Amino acid sequence: MAVSEILLKSCSLFRNADASVVQQAASRMSLLQLKKREVLLINGRPFRGLGVVLEGRMQSMDYTIDGREVALTTVNSFAAFGQANLIAPHPVDLTWVAVAPSKLAVMPPQAALELLQHADMSMQVAVDLAQQVCEFLSWQKILSVHPINARVCAWVSWAAGERASLAIPRHAELAWRLNTTRESITRTLQKLQAEQILRRDGEVWLIDNLVVLQKMAQGDNRGVY
């Protein structure tokens, strides 16, 4: 099945690309449907090309030395993935797993490298990767916060940004990213609700007391100047 050029234009990687470049990309891509928790494999091997999430959500997964499964990065709908490993001198082996039922457009490595020869595509890849670096740095700052309940508050404050609401992923998924347990995430969120700092409205979480939330997010540094 052909990949829709209109859908590709919804992805930040192709949003400002020339029509001829988008057409080239669509002609070299294949559509894949993944079930929840299904691993993205091409001919039985881990994916190493360029992909776009058209529906659903993907995560790169790995295991710690003690055998715990960890999520390294998350890619939401209409975002690209795989571009870092395409151009990195020493790429990191990643296993991509569907967090939810997902539809993907995928391109083989050589075709993707040819696509990136276009100047506008190279610039957009640079922009996307720069944003990823900034997000990774933000995660590192959050992971340095102690204790765990303060780390959760720091993440909530960061994820909400300038908004007074946010969507919180599955507790197990958030626990992977925050290097803690699902139970710790659940306990902290319950406490924030009981203290009327957060309030849940369906799938959306509302921040009712941002000042207290930000104070709690300081953790062990609270009161240190």
Image (cartoon, helix red, strand yellow):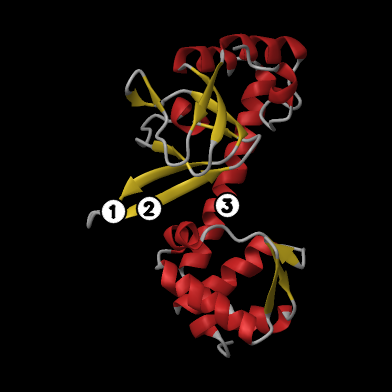
Q: Amino acid under label 2?
A: Val
Point out the tag, 3 or 1, that comes first from the N-terminus.
Answer: 1
In the picture, the quarter occupied by the C terminus is bottom right
The picture places residue 141, in percent across and down from the top left corner, at: 52, 65
* Image location of residue 49, percent across then percent down: 46, 23
Q: Mark 2 packing: few (<14 Cα in 10 Å), some, or many (20+)?
A: some
Residue that carries the numbered disc 1 in the rendered image: 64
On the question of residue 162 being in view, the answer is yes
How far apart, in angstroms, are the residues tagged by discs 2 and 3? 17 Å
Counting residues from the start of the chain, the first of labels 2 and 3 encountered is 2
Compute the Cα span from label 3 to label 1: 21 Å
Marker disc for residue 70: 2
Residue contact at pointers 2 and 3, CB within 8 angstroms:
no
Question: Residue sitting at 69 percent across and 17 percent down?
Answer: 4
Residue carrying label 3:
135
Task: Please state the horizontal and vertical placement of residue 115, each as a whole percent of the image.
Answer: 58, 15
Left or right of 44, for residue 118: right
Asked whether the beta carbons under mark 2 and mark 1 sit within 8 Å of each other, the answer is yes
Circle 1 sits in a helix, a strand or a loop, which is it?
loop
* Circle 1 crowding by C-alpha within 10 Å: few under 14, some 14–19, many from 20: few
Q: In this view of the protein, can residue 218 be seen by the observer?
A: no
Instruction: Give, as a three-letter code, the residue at label 1.
Output: Thr
Q: Secondary structure at mark 2?
A: strand
- Mark pair 2, 1: CA separation: 7 Å
